[in-house]
Amino acid sequence: MNVSPQPNPLNPASLPLIPAVSFSRKPAAPEPGEPAVTPPPKDNPTSFVRKPKMASKPRKREIPEGLWTKCPKCSTMLFDKELDENLKVCSQCQYHFPIGSRERIHSMVETCTFEEMDAQMTSVDALGFTGVATYTSKLEAYQKSTGLKDAVVTGIGKIGGHRAGLGVMDFSFLGGSMGSVVGEKLTRLIERATEKALPLIIISTSGGARMYEGMFSLMQMAKTSAALAYHAKARLPYFSVLTHPTTAGVMASYATLGDLILAEPGAMIGFAGPRVIKDTTQAELPPGFQTAEFLLDRGLIDAIVPRREMKERIITYLGYVTAGRNGSTAAARI
Ligand SMILES: [Zn+2]
């Protein structure tokens, strides 16, 4: 019996021959002409040095400008429409943003009851002020950008059930500075309120007297104060509302002459700026100096009223001071 010998695994010579071709592998490399990996750029020998571009930059453009506002106090992004509905008060931290005079009047008076006075009154360049730009060109630029003729809007309107004279300053017009127009419009408003036996409310925000009109600005302090004296003599109430910021010549005249002085939370209120006071007195100023809260503690102002409650509070106070009297008896006392 012819039996083929069993292969001895220890003896390679006894192993059957396997064609070498069966061991050949298909090369892993791609077809010739096609590189295995993208070759690094010639000027940059190591491809990992260059950082991949982050996709975060274009995300900034996903928020269209003019739709969101960042709160400077708590950094919350606030939707502009909601901010407007909230009278420009941050819903998270109650920070009071600046608000325009028109919006404020809208928030205070009953719809369609505001009769504006002296709407077209504008300043003239009485001193021929020269500087980087002429006063006239500055006025024109601000009139164009704000849609206002000057830094105050005055008129008579109904607040709750009370007819009242209302003057509202606007910081966006030349820093709410008081020149001859602000003084004259307010004086006419005060005189009209006195004549018609109406209570008066002036909401102030101002950097002070307007330097472009020199002495004409300064004399408005005396003029408005004198008109208020006649209003007070007629035993008519005057409420002064101080908003951020109310300083200098306005603070030194009609803003502090209110029978009732109210302020918005966090408003900066003072005569000279803190740096000037520090330099003059050479003293350390206490924390919170010149804020509404600081002045409430020291009795300069009577109450701090959040903007959203301002109208209701003024209606309440007007109710207190006009209780048991009517306009005609007050007018008869002049
Ligand atoms: Zn906030």
Image: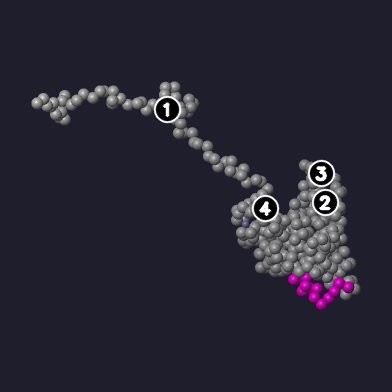
Between circles 4 and 1, the one closer to the viewer is 1
The residue labelled by disc 4 is 80
The residue labelled by disc 3 is 137
Q: Residue at x 49, y 36 (%)?
A: 51
Query: Measured from the top left, where is residue 78 in percent x and y?
Result: 64, 54
Image quarter (top left, top right, bottom left or bottom right) of the N terminus: top left
Q: CA distance from mark 4 to mark 3?
A: 31 Å
Q: Amino acid at mark 2?
A: Lys
Between circles 2 and 1, the one closer to the viewer is 1
Q: Which residues are magenta?
A: 316-328
* Crowd rating for badge 2 (residues with CA inside 10 Å; few <14, some 14–19, many 20+): many
**Depth check, front residue: 40 or 209:** 40
Query: Measured from the top left, where is residue 294 in percent x and y?
Result: 66, 64
The residue labelled by disc 1 is 36
Task: Specify the color scheme.
Answer: one colour
Between circles 2 and 3, the one closer to the viewer is 2
Report the residue that reaches farthest toward the left: 1
Let me know if residue 210 is in the magenta part.
no
First-in-chain label (2 vs 4): 4
The residue labelled by disc 2 is 149
